[in-house]
Image (cartoon, grey):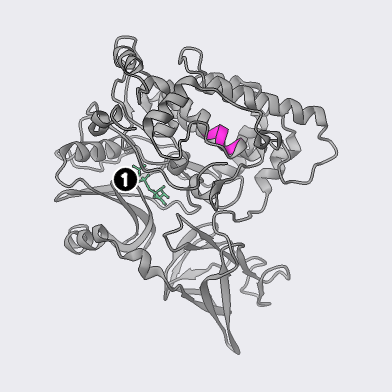
Amino acid sequence: MIRARRNHSRHALASIININSQPSQQSTQLLMAVAELPYQNSSVSGSEPIATLLMRTPNDQKVIYITGDRDFSFGRKSTCDEVVAHDAVSSVHFTVYTVKFDDESTPLVYCWDKSRNGTFHNRRLIGRDKRVLLSDGDELEVRHACSFTVHQRGQKIMETHELVDAVLDEDRRDIEPYEISSRALGHGTFGRVLLATERGAGGRQVACKVIDTKGNSLRMVKAKTEVAILQRLRHPNVVAVHDAFVIRNRIYIFEDLITGGDLFSYLSDGEHMSSVPEAEALLIVFQILKALEYLHSNNITHRDLKLDNILRVSQHPGSRILLIDFGISKYYVRDRSRRMTTVAGTPEYAAPEIGFAASNTFAGAAKRSGYDMKCDLWSLGVILHILLSGISPFYDPSQNSRKMALKAQTCALDFSNSCWASVSPHGNLPLPSFVFLADILNSRKIAKSLVRRLLSVDPRIRYDVSECFAHPWVSSQRALLEDIYERKIINGWVPPSEQRQILSASQSAAFFCI
Ligand SMILES: Nc1ncnc2c1ncn2[C@@H]1O[C@H](COP(=O)(O)OP(=O)(O)OP(=O)(O)O)[C@@H](O)[C@H]1O
């Protein structure tokens, strides 16, 4: 199959010069079942302990090992991994799970509070259905019953990074409302994403994206564009930004901490990528469509949709997902005379008309005619292809953007690979008797037809968001999807406040800057 290595070769304005020179019909019950499915961690494998909890009760103390292959549950119910029969303890009080960014990073260990009476993290109430990232030395407490001390060795490895070290000591004191830790949640082309905590009573954990512009004004403009775009957006499937600071050559963007890892990590399976059950793919794609519907109706094109830029709130297959990384997004009003022309995005996911051109002729054509927001739908097609088969259709192992662009331009989709044969609505769920073979075959055909529609080289034929919603793979389940979405997926989502002035006027970027 394909690689499980992150591709950070994102290209935007500055890299244009390099481009040419570089080498069922689902059944109702099934969908419901997936939305309810307990999580099986594929992103962190192995039974080696990642962290330990030293548990103390009034009469006893013991060590609990947290491994990467399964959640640890604590509660009163006999099915919990650690059972304490105490009135203050809920049937499942909390679970601890791990998320891995990549092979070089120490896995992140999260606590998910599921209790009625509360779980306290460093003496602060986590809150029902909320999650916190745990660090070495942290204390968890179930009042009147027991407490736990977290030990996670190896954290230091992840913490040492020149950028982080140099940046923070200098800048920390200028960013008063937040305490920025050195714990990395992930990293990309231009910087790192670190854990931070709001000072003050709430002490909420947030993610802090640190972009080192190294005095490159174009990078600074792009970082400010990301903030300028994000501060206008309020949608359950788009990450919320709270604050941003420009200090010296660096920009710090504070966002909601998203606690389930990204889709790339989720699908990475050793050297390969794995697929997900078709119903799970549908729940993910439905949410991406919701986000794109919102973005496009607000004249925003994301331009860098890919697995790495889609985060999950939880490890649960029916989790809410969020789009992140609006660094090369574009505010663009649809108009025949105004089209986007910047070659931007990630070649593996980029629509042919963007112009990661394989041939000069094609590049020339792209330059002449430009492209519009349909480029996001192509990227969605690549994502759907991966979700269903575990294959990235245009990936080139040498990461050569020219080769990937050529493949995309030719777009010879091959559904004969055995991976596609296993695409079915039931995936690894036991097949319920009400799902007939015809349904399964039909569903496969329908899913593939949507992939084809999205991966149409001609953007005029390619589906837009509303056509995707109308496609039978989605429309046949639309009512149920809306129901699951409202009742389960976005239940509890609180929109960010309306009045958000994140960068001061002098700092904010012009909207049409890229
Ligand atoms: N709000 C968040 N909460 C938790 N993790 C996050 C958050 N934002 C980013 N991350 C993690 O950090 C990684 C990099 O983030 P992001 O894509 O924003 O960085 P970038 O430098 O813009 O990357 P790129 O290489 O795509 O330019 C993500 O893939 C994700 O794993």
Residue 506: quarter of image: top left
Ligand 1 contact, mark 1 (Cβ < 8 Å): yes
x%, y% of residue 196?
Answer: 33, 59
Question: Residue under circle 1?
Answer: 189
- In the displayed orientation, state which residue is furthest to the bottom: 59
- Magenta region: which residues? 383-388
x%, y% of residue 289?
Answer: 52, 30
Q: Residue at x 63, y 42 (%)?
A: 276
On the rendered structure, is 509 left or right of 466? left
Choose between 324 and 216: the one closer to the eye.
216
386 part of magenta stretch: yes
390 part of magenta stretch: no
- In the displayed orientation, state which residue is furthest to the top: 337
Disc 1, SS? loop
Characterize the local packing of mark 1: few (<14), some (14-19) or many (20 or more) Cα atoms within 10 angstroms. Answer: few
Q: Residue at x 59, y 45 (%)?
A: 274
Choose between 242 and 163: the one closer to the eye.
163
On the rendered structure, is 23 left or right of 144? left
Please determine whether, in this image, residue 138 is positioned above or below residue 217: below
Q: Amino acid at mark 1?
A: Thr
Q: Main secondary structure of the magenta part?
A: helix
Q: Quadrant of the N terminus?
A: top right
Q: Residue at x 23, y 29 (%)?
A: 17
Residue 480: quarter of image: top right
x%, y% of residue 400?
Answer: 38, 35
